[in-house]
Amino acid sequence: MSDSSSVLSDVKSSELSKPVILSSLRDFDIPGKICPPHTQQQIDLILLALEALEVGGGEYMLGLAKQLELEDIIKNRVEFWRLRCTNFWRKSYNRDNLSLDQAKALVIIASYRAKQLTVLIRQLLTAEQQMRQRNFPLGTNFLLSEYLERFRAHFHGRMNPRRAKISVYLASESELDNLAISLLNKLLFCTGTKGMERFWVSLFDGEVA
């Protein structure tokens, strides 16, 4: 077999070994087939919001990786953590880049988990609207207060305070709460018709033609 035939065979074999579910999200023609920093940041933040929705949120997402046959990409919690540390806001930022397949896997897990938590997400967003309409503090609602407290704790514990934007969030509880609410809206967006696909495309706005 010639060298070119061997390379082609290896490519085809690699494509066949990919989890089928990855094909539900389109590929983008981006340099090196690696994700831009902003995309990596947004994926980690959406996962952070999911973690804040429930105790043990990270473990539920790892369970989904197994159910969706994404274990070749997300083998265990250490690998899950390493992929998320491509977010340059993190204290543990590792300067790696997510491949498109790694990013797809994380988005698929986030979207599937968001669908499973649709009722809770809607309850929290309804509560947020009601609190604002009545000019009540967001923490007045018990469910919303729990989510916001967990989100703030995760954010404080994992993000690098030396980053200018992070320092702004850490200095203002209301700004951080607004971020947490905006992420809830993105999670709800993921649960809609073609939500996962549309969320995936939105992550590359301004990055591809």
Image (cartoon, helix red, strand yellow):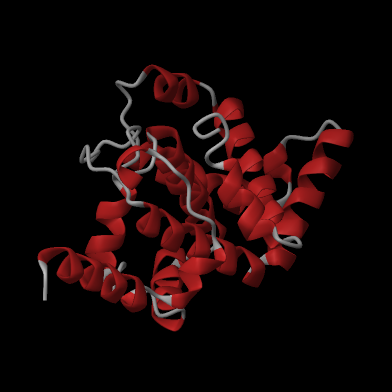
The answer to whether residue 142 shows anywhere in this view is no
Q: Is residue 180 left or right of residue 191?
A: left
Name which residue lies at 31% across and 61% down: 80
Quarter of the image containing the N terminus? bottom left
Name which residue lies at 54% across and 42% down: 203
Point out residue 142 in the picture as x, y percentages from the top left corner. 69, 54
Above or below, 23 relative to 170: below
Point out residue 180 in the picture as x, y percentages from the top left corner. 59, 41
Point out residue 26 in the picture as x, y percentages from the top left corner. 54, 56
Identify which residue, 64 or 68, lies in the foreground: 68
The answer to whether residue 201 shows anywhere in this view is yes
Quarter of the image containing the C terminus? top right
Point out residue 191 in the picture as x, y percentages from the top left corner. 69, 62
How many marks overall? 0
Residue occupying the far right of the picture = 133
Name which residue lies at 70% across and 65% down: 118
